[in-house]
Image: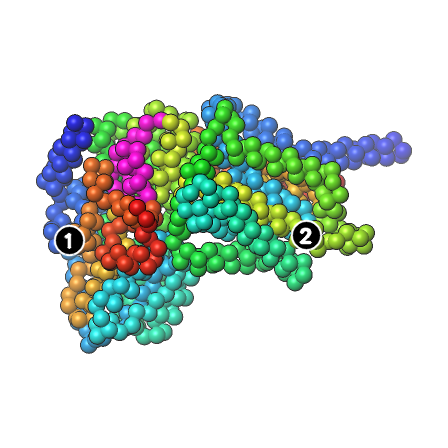
Amino acid sequence: MSVAKTVESSSIADSWRIRKLVVDYGVYMALALLLTAAAFLTPKLFQVDTIAIVMRQASQLGIVAIGQTMILLVAGLDLSVGGVIVMTSVAVAEVSNGRDEMVLPAILIALGLGVIVGLGNGILVTKRRVPPFVATLGMLVLVQGATQAYTRGVPGGFVPEMLGMVNQSWGFLSIPLVLWLGLNAAFIFILRRTAYGRKVYAVGSNIEAARLSGISVDAIRISVYIFGACFAVISGVVLTGYVGYVDRFIGTGLELDSIAAAVVGGTAFVGGRGGLLGTIAGVLIIQILSTMAVLMGLDVEVQFIIKGLVILGAVTLYSVARVES
Amino acid sequence: MNRILRMTLILVLLLTASALSYGQDDESGGLDFEFTEEQIEASPYLQSVLSRLDEVYDTSDFAKDGPYRIAFAAQGTSNAWSALMDAHAYWYVEELGEDVVSELLYGDAQASADIQVPQVEDLLAQEPDALILVPMGAAALSAPVERAMMQGVPVILCASAVETNNFVTEVGTNLWVVGASLAQYVVDQLGGEGNVLIMTGIPGVTTSDIMEEGADAVFAANPGINILDKQPGFWSPADAKGIMETWLVQHGDDIDAIWSGGAQMSQGIISAYLDAGMDIPPIGGGEWQNGFLRLALDHEIQYLAWQYPNAMITLCIDAALQVLAGEPIPRFIDFVGKIDNSDPFTDVEGADYFRPDWSDDVHGPITMPDEKLAELGFLVEE
């Protein structure tokens, strides 16, 4: 009888370990698998030029995904980032009107607007108790409307030549990549090593327990929404320099892709679990899949199906592993 | 010397094309193109446009005295192209005077079919004398068009089509021929042999799909053309640049020419080449968009540009007035030849089209005075 019990408990322990392995390292294993597949299917992916392109394009999504991950960690969500990116592009072009010396003031103005948007999202979610999906969707429409009202539907101005520097590469290094990695390093440190980071996880894990332990829950939640909007502004600046042109549809889809990257990377929708290292892997998976699809000449429909399957697969795997463990 | 050779080649091509033209008469305007029976059979769009070119609608049932109240269901506040179309509409109505058009009822679809469908209902509830519709979805707008016609409101489609055939007339151009002509330019530039990349607009959007259909037909008829890949650039410079960067890694110097379904995407394509420091091959697919022309001139790019002038709204308003006067009207009105400078053009003539005093997002040709452009903020200091 006791032998049977020992075998049973050993089997449960093994199963628990596997599930924990999936939760903790699943995204990295998936990335490794993807890279192995790429070695056979699209060897060109490993050329320095291609790595530079993948990294530069991943940085645009990756910067937004940092903010999105932090918001997801407090059980939030931000759909307004796409609107903030377009707003940034318009602000940079309108304020600078092509003058390099006005780049910094233009970015500061865009950051100021981003802070207002993030603050608005945070206040709606915390003080008015509007569900994050509704609050940030409303904010998205508001920001898009305000941008259109300002431009009368016609984004004008010129993008300063200085912003074109985001297109330069040194080997596989580029300014967007350095920015992405630098911001990640800073915020991984903040989330893991500072009191603020521990409070973010505490609020996401159990909001009532966090409140009872004296954490200013609302301030933490508002702050992550402000960070989220600021990261969208930074990504907007990078994208504007990348395209060299103000486009109303710039950044379209980044709100959903950034959520997908964070979720594929293991950050839970319910908050409190996950982190930026996983999101980096999630961003790379999404970007590498896109690049591989073009390198393989796959039809766009197939690309969407593969992307959808990866996201659904990741969410299903995590939910099963988490619930059962 | 190179430029003279290119000009001679284009002249020869134009003469050949007109000699081989299918028989679109001068009245129909438009691009000349020789269709094969197979191409017509394979394309319901082509069948519809070609049959409507010769068809005339009896508008006597709609005849009434003016001044008229005309509803304009526009694409609305979405981009510079549609902002300029709206500006042309208001300017032209003002020019016609209140004794001709007493009121222009306006609906802003924000480029969304979901918004436009109920908006058309709202416009019809105001009992306009005619409806000018810039359809945001061929399928979604079919039922509202049918309802308008049942209500006795003549419908003039502007810049795009719907799936139903129950409307009075359509103002636009043969998009199949546009796609085919851009492809033919690519084939001609390559002497019938070479590697080509295709960047389409948004899959599922009629304009994009029909252009692609025309391009496919021409490339299929030229066995020396090898299609390296086809991807959608979603009419976005950012998406187009991202795809082009990957294509450059994959195909590099093997790329002999590119077919592009829009100037925004051509800008992204050019930007990727400039970043890579590579020579830019001929591009079949620009437009009279000032930003594209600026890039093309600065970097001496070979291209064929087609046009989709927002000023075609003036023809749509004219068509509405013709219908309300009870005059018979062709069921398809091609703007080419009816709006000045709306013909396709190449890099040889590009400098004549570029306007240094226009902002990059202006789509020509513009038929309203410069003061109107200035009011909208489209004029810049030279």
Q: Is residue B238 above or below residue B77?
A: above
- Judge depth for marks 1 and 2 and give the one in front: 2
Hey, which residue is sitting farthest bottom in the picture? Answer: B65
Q: Is residue A167 above or below residue B363?
A: above
Q: What residue is rendered at 21% in x and 74% in y? A: B99
Assess disc 1: are there few (<14), some (14-19) or many (≥20) residues with their C-alpha within 10 Å of its C-alpha: some
Residue type for callout 1: Ser
Q: Quadrant of residue A181?
A: top right
Look at the image and say whether residue B283 sits in the magenta stretch: yes
Q: Secondary structure at mark 2?
A: helix
Q: Quadrant of residue A116?
A: bottom right
Residue at image mark 2: A221
Q: Quadrant of the N terminus of chain B?
A: top left
Q: Is residue B252 left or right of residue A262?
A: left
Point out residue B348 in the picture as x, y percentages from the top left corner.
20, 36
Residue at image mark 1: B28
Point out residue B274 in the picture as x, y percentages from the top left corner.
37, 31
Residue type for callout 2: Arg
Q: Chain of mark 2?
A: A
3D distance between C-alphas at marks 1 and 2: 63 Å
Q: Which residues are magenta?
A: B278-306
Q: Is residue B242 left or right of residue A36?
A: left
Q: What residue is rendered at 63% in x and 30% in y? A: A29
Assess disc 2: are there few (<14), some (14-19) or many (≥20) residues with their C-alpha within 10 Å of its C-alpha: many
Q: Disc 1 vs disc 2: Cβ atoms closer than 8 Å?
A: no
Q: Is residue B283 above or below residue B155?
A: above
In this rendering, does residue B87 appear at all? yes
**How many discs mark residues in the rendered view?**
2
